Amino acid sequence: MDDQARARLIRRFGEDVATWCDDLPALVARLSERWGLTVVDTKPGNTGRTLICEGDDGAKKVLKLTPDHAIAESEAAALRAWDGCSRVAQVLATEIADGAILLEGIDPGTQLLEAGANVPWAEVGDLLTQIHAVTPPPGFSTLEDRVVFMYDLAERGLRGSVAEATLSMETLDRARLRALALATDGGGNAIVHGDLHPGNVLDGGPDRGAVAIDPRPSVGDPSFDLADWVTLPMRDGGTLEDGFDAIAPHLPGFDAGRVRAWCVALSPLFVMRPLERGERTPFVEAMVLMTA
């Protein structure tokens, strides 16, 4: 693990995670032997390590490891609930006591992060339809819990940062209240992915299409999962309405009012990191106006 990846985990979990980082090679070796894996590549992550592997059977597989076993447990539970959904990466094995999940490999597996105007909207609509149609099993946290976590994390990151000059704590608190109101007003009872931005959707090739990974699941309003998608056209100079027009034909029951409300409530979270980097793009400026 390089210094940058180590620092990212320490920033997220605190200094105690350094021991986990030191012990990681031994854990990888033990799990690789158990599951017949050869590590061929690594991917960065904010909550652990993702290792691209080749199985003894020659198939591409993905080994995910996190020091927070609750993250592994909730992710595995969501993926198990979505078992058989073609638009979701499938679980091959888990070892929650080690914070480990073994997943099928997705080929070519490139992210939709920078897809821009080339977003496969029909596939994204089908993805959202599939995951939100599954009846939530017992044991998931609520979307309210997810909102509380996200805004607590954002508050810690914003306080004293460069971004605070533009994005005040009062603005963040106002957005938090908006998000909590949406999360608790009975807007839905679906399994919400919770982190469904284009970086967490992979290209599965012509036969598979868009495939979701890395859920941070809860139960609540499915409109939450649309905010990262309808705002995509704004990054290329478009409008929120352009995003609505792109996804609505592929998503039965699309509720523009609720999706817009979620975009407003989550707008500070879209701009915190860009503001810290000193970015003042048209997208950032539009999102800052939305926070008002």
Image (tube, rainbow, N blue to C red):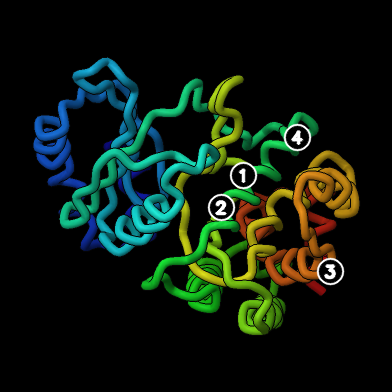
- Give the Cα distance between marks 4 and 2: 23 Å
Q: Is residue 3 visible?
A: no
In the rendered image, which residue does mark 1 sit on? 127
Q: Is residue 244 left or right of residue 126?
A: right
Q: Nearer the viewer, mark 3 or mark 4?
A: 3
Q: Nearer the viewer, mark 1 or mark 3?
A: 1
Find residue 152 and report its horizontal and vertical position in percent.
50, 75
Find residue 84 and report its horizontal and vertical position in percent.
45, 42
Instruction: Kindly state the secondary structure of the residue where label 1 is placed.
Output: helix
From the viewer's side, name the closer residue of 201 and 268.
201
- Give the Cα distance between marks 1 and 3: 21 Å
Residue 271 vs 48, above or below: the answer is below
Disc with the residue nearer the chain's start (1 vs 3):
1
- Give the Cα distance between marks 1 and 2: 6 Å
In the rendered image, which residue does mark 2 sit on? 131
**Residue at 67 percent of width and 33 percent of height:** 114
Q: Amino acid at mark 1?
A: Leu
Give the quarter of the figure containing the C terminus: bottom right
- Give the Cα distance between marks 2 and 3: 21 Å
Disc with the residue nearer the chain's start (2 vs 3):
2
Q: Are marks 3 and 4 in contact (CB under 8 Å)?
A: no
Q: Are marks 1 and 2 in contact (CB under 8 Å)?
A: yes
Instruction: Kindly state the secondary structure of the residue where label 2 is placed.
Output: helix
Q: Is residue 249 visible?
A: yes
Residue 126 vs 187, above or below: the answer is above
Instruction: Kindly state the secondary structure of the residue where label 4 is placed.
Output: helix
Q: Amino acid at mark 3?
A: Gly
From the viewer's side, name the closer residue of 281 and 86.
86
Residue 257's tag is 3
- Give the Cα distance between marks 4 and 1: 18 Å
In the rendered image, which residue does mark 4 sit on? 116
